[in-house]
Image (cartoon, grey):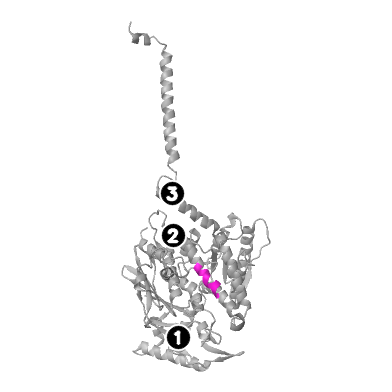
Amino acid sequence: MRVSDNLWAVEPVSYVATVIIISGLVIITMTYVVSGLLRRSPSPYNSGDELLSTWASLTQQYFELFQHDLGRPLRRILGKEREVRATIDLSNQALYGDVVELLDEIEGQAPNFRLMMSNVQVLIEMETPSEDLVLEPVEPLEIVRRIVDRYTFAAADGKKEITWWSDPDDFGIVYCGASAIEHIITNVVDNAVRFADKRIEIKLVREGTEFSIHVWDDGFGIPEEYRSHIFDRGWTPELAKREERTTSGLGMFIAKTLSQRYGGDLCIQSLVGDTAKHYTEFTLTLPIKEYVS
Amino acid sequence: MDGKTEHILVVDDEWESPIVGAVIRTLEQEGWKTSVIKPQLSADIGHDFEAETLYSIETIRPSGILLDVRLGEYREDQFKGLEILHKIVELYPTMPVLMFTQYTQGPERDTAVRSSLQLDSTVDFIDKLASPQEVILRLRRLIGRPPAYIVMGEKLILDVDASLVQIKQGEDLETVSDIQGMKFEILRELASTWYRSPGQLVPFSKLERYSDGEEARASLRVRIREIKNSLGNALGVKFGAGDFIINVRDQGYRLVPPKTFNNQ
């Protein structure tokens, strides 16, 4: 009698039990593998992009959560400053000269702080792996008007004047990113107000398939050796002169990067020297895109 | 003189803070009336603000509202102002509302930028750290009514309704009689633009309709010189090419801000 004949003699229920055990082992193994895959997939440590995305999103959430509290100290300082300003005779230089200087410094640093904070936020956004850009109807003339509102009084404190106009007068709507345009032009105007001697001029031009915003100032100008660095991240003129930094050096880098992200560019022209003709002009050029619903 | 005094309703849980106080003070210096919502402190501060705001709009019918996005310290009150805004827009669609926001980027800021794109929109957003003068400018544009009077500097008053230019001499007002007709219209156009949007140039195309003859621009130049001479004589100053009304890059003219004008 052969061995196989002996095996067939085993109780049939043993075969059924063997099938059940093997099936159970397969199911357990499959469950373990699948659950492992599921556990791994949302992990932020899979790739650099995902890690960055999680970090950026978390940082943005913190900004949004605490933005009211982040602004509180500056609101209190500014409020007190404006209260004092309202109670003293600003024209009495002999008595209040130093106080007025301090009040002006506080008022002057407020936009600087605001811009620096929003620059940090935009920088986080820019470094986050992003989806496609969303184009929206934008009225650049209104954006420029509001930026001029913001800087007119700060400029006037420094005996500087901002003039602006649009060609054509009725500029109309373009499809772009409202926040991006506002952010680029705010940085450029902030820079112009800082370095202008007396005058800042802003001109909007709509021509063919593109539009441009020119920001001109009559400041001393930017030497050629600095011009190639002006859009570098973290670079400021003080850095080159070994002086105390007054800005973060992020603004122009962000402005240039944002303009290129929207298919345009930010360029600089400048004339330096003792001649009365010295100037600096930044030109933002962006395409007038068609609306796609 | 202030027959059309604007009345602004202020809705902000920090109404006693110096920063909001500075805005209220500047609004009142502008000659505007202010009413501040001050609900009794209760467990549901957001709801109290909403109820009192809607009641006040109905009873005082303000010219405009200054409304904080965040009312109260609780997380659910973080955007309570936006909820109140939706109700205001629903009930009073033409009511000008200026929303106070924080200074940072993010969804709230993006909403702010997008919502204030159109010139004729009655809702706009402004950074809470903005200067009180900036708040005034935004409110002027939102309210949109041409003012009855435009005060330029300490002494010069443009009476828009009566088409007169007046000079303050102590307590008295003296009319500058030779600024009338086209010359008054040119000055009104320049002053109105400055009032709503300082720094904005008035292009030749807008001003040339107030001149005549084949050489419209030359005629305009002569009229502007005459305006400067007349007002200079009345004020006892001599306006140069860079004073009061300035030709910018052969594009148009603009009025010099009164602060500079005061220093003449």
Give the number of the disc on residue A51: 3
Give the number of the disc on residue A49: none
Task: Measuring from the top left, give residue A117's x and y in whole percent.
Answer: 49, 63
Choose the circle earlier in sequence order: 2 or 3. Answer: 3
User: Which type of secondary structure does the marked residue at label 2 adopt?
Assistant: helix
Residue at mark 1:
B245
Which dot, 3 or 1, sits closer to the camera? 3
Q: Residue furthest front?
A: A242
Please provide the residue range marked out in magenta: A104-112
Which chain hosts label 3?
Answer: A
- Depth order, front residue of A31/A136: A31
User: Which type of secondary structure does the marked residue at label 3 adopt?
Assistant: helix
Q: Main secondary structure of the magenta part?
A: helix
Q: Around disc 2, counting alpha carbons within 10 Å, would you say few (fewer than 14), some (14 to 19), or many (20 or more)?
A: some
For residue A38, what is the image quadrant?
top left
Number of numbered discs overlaid on the protein picture: 3
- Depth order, front residue of A228/A206: A228
Determine if the magenta segment contains residue A105: yes
User: Which type of secondary structure does the marked residue at label 1 adopt?
Assistant: strand
Q: Mark 1 belongs to which amino acid? A: Ile
Q: Mark 2 belongs to which amino acid? A: Leu
